[in-house]
Amino acid sequence: MTERVAAHQRLTTRVLFFLTLALVPLGVIGVVQNQRLGMEAELRSDLSLRALTETAASGERQLIQRAFGATQALANSIESVLDDPEVCQNFLKRFLRSDEKFAFVGFIEPDGSSVCSTADMALDYSEEESFQKLLAEPKPTVDVLLDDPTTEMSVLTLTQPVFNGTGLKGFMLGALPLRDVVESEDFLGEANPVTLVTFNHEGTLLSSESGRLQAERKLPSSFALSELAHGESRTFTDTHMDGDELAYAVIPIVPDVVYALSSWNTDETYNDPDAAAWLNIALPFVMWLSSLLVAWFVIDRFVIARVTRLNKAMRRFSQERTVPEFGQNRGAPAELLMIEDGFRSLAEDLIQDEAEQEHRLREKSILLKEVHHRVKNNLQIISSIMNMQIRKARSPETKYALGQVQDRIMGLSGVHRTLYQAETLTQISAAKLIEQIVEQSQAIGTRDDRKVTLNLDLEPVIVFPDQAVPLAMLVSEALTNATKYLGAAEGETAHLSVHLSLSEEETARLFIENTRNPNTVAAEAPDDLSTGLGQQLIRAFATQLNGEIEVHETPTSYAIETRFRVEDFRDEVVDY
């Protein structure tokens, strides 16, 4: 069955993708050229708009920057005269007479009071919101104050924080007449903006050449002034309150403190986009699409069809092991014909190699099974010889000892019989092996004319030869021990149970239990695990299995439980 292949993994998709990568740059060149021209024109318009705004705000820039510098100079030198209010006040008045652009100059203490200023009275700014903001975040600021009671005019206030070695000392305040800021001379020539305003970092409108009300109606509707008060200069288009679209330009006068915003008619600054610009995109797109269609037809006809036939032939070979026949090769590319010939040759060689390998494997398997069969026969011969020796023996102890050895030899014989009868020589069915050991056990039967009930509960557990031998010997010894003391109360049937199970953790559990006559327990008690040859052998075989032994004993039953982990082949031999 042919598996469905995702679209992105198909040869056609990948070839068309890389063909697109090759064709797109050619088609994009025309579009890029026109876009580049448009971008250059737009960039020139932006630069021109910024330059016009720089020129329009040149008067405000010059006045505010000079006043800002003067206020900063005062902030740096005022500390030397702060201790004497009269000297400080005379110092500021001399400065005011020397610099006529200021309407007021004063120093504000951190508590909001001002006794050192050009005013003839003490001032208190502690309740004003602007002072509270300054106190919370001391930094240079510019603000507007309409109808200032101190100067009796509208002023532009410039504030500089004063610091010393211990922290904030106060604030240096300077006030410029707002009229001077608005009427400052610029160098625009014939180009005039619709509006030109200045605003601070909080978005407060400071000054406007066309009046505050008119300027507020011409502000962009999509942006607040506070959103424009950061970063470098920028240009954009937007509509204002009256619904008309204007081009706007923002430039910093004092970075992060004061900015200028100008608005211009769009027909004076921006050109309309070319109405036929879509043709520059449609034509390359049509050329790209036609190229993809031609490429798809060629790939599907000369490549995909032949590759699909080759794939089907490979699948048929993997399932049926038949040499493929590709039929007519008319129109097939020479490279694909070479691949088909190579696959045909590979298939023939592979079939021949597999036949030879299967033949060799069969010979080895037969030879190994013959080895196990001969070993089993030899062990049975030894068992027969011992059986003859048992019949000639006169002492019951000798007969019993030889019978014990004979049982162990027959246990080994059962392992080899299972190996040569098994389909695979590397895995042995533990359940089948235990069944054979139980069947050949000479001790299972009747005792004192009492019947014995045998209960086998064996799960299909697979073990490797390294564990099969100690497992068989352990079962044989445990059965010998169990049947030796097998019994039951008078009138009851003796029971012998063998259980084998496998847990999810690949741990096997072997449980062998026999009933016994409670009246003869003291006389015929099984040997303790620490004494007796049989129990020592059981413990040794459990150690070879890397297992653990537990004995469960009651007056009417005796059981041996062994747990071991089913493991792979081990090449280390332990000497016990």
Image (tube, rainbow, N blue to C red):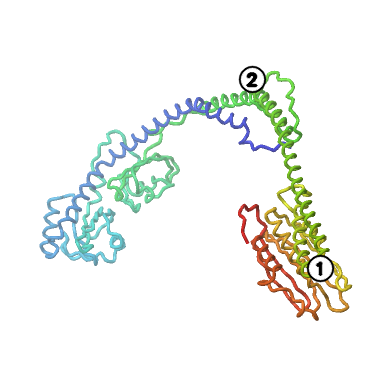
Is residue 337 shown left or right of residue 391?
left
Is residue 34 shown left or right of residue 341?
left
Given contact means CB atoms under 8 Å apart, are the residues at marks 2 and 1 in contact? no
Query: Is 6 above or below relative to 373?
Result: above
| Residue sitting at the far top | 330
Q: Nearer the viewer, residue 515 or 236?
A: 515
Q: Which residue is mark 1?
A: 394
Quarter assignment of residue 187? top left
Quarter assignment of residue 266? top left
* Label 2 secondary element: helix
Q: Identify residue type, mark 2.
A: Ala
Where is residue 547 shown, x and y percent of the image? 65, 63
Where is residue 172 shown, x and y percent of the image? 21, 58
Q: Identify residue type, mark 1.
A: Arg
Q: Is residue 297 visible?
A: no
Q: Residue at x 63, y 33 (%)?
A: 10
Query: Is 68 above or below relative to 38?
Result: below
Quarter assignment of residue 404? bottom right
Q: Within 10 Å of the Cα at label 1, are there few (<14), some (14-19), or many (20+) other Cα atoms? A: few
Q: Which residue is mark 2?
A: 334
* Label 1 secondary element: loop
Quadrant in which the C terminus is drawn: bottom right
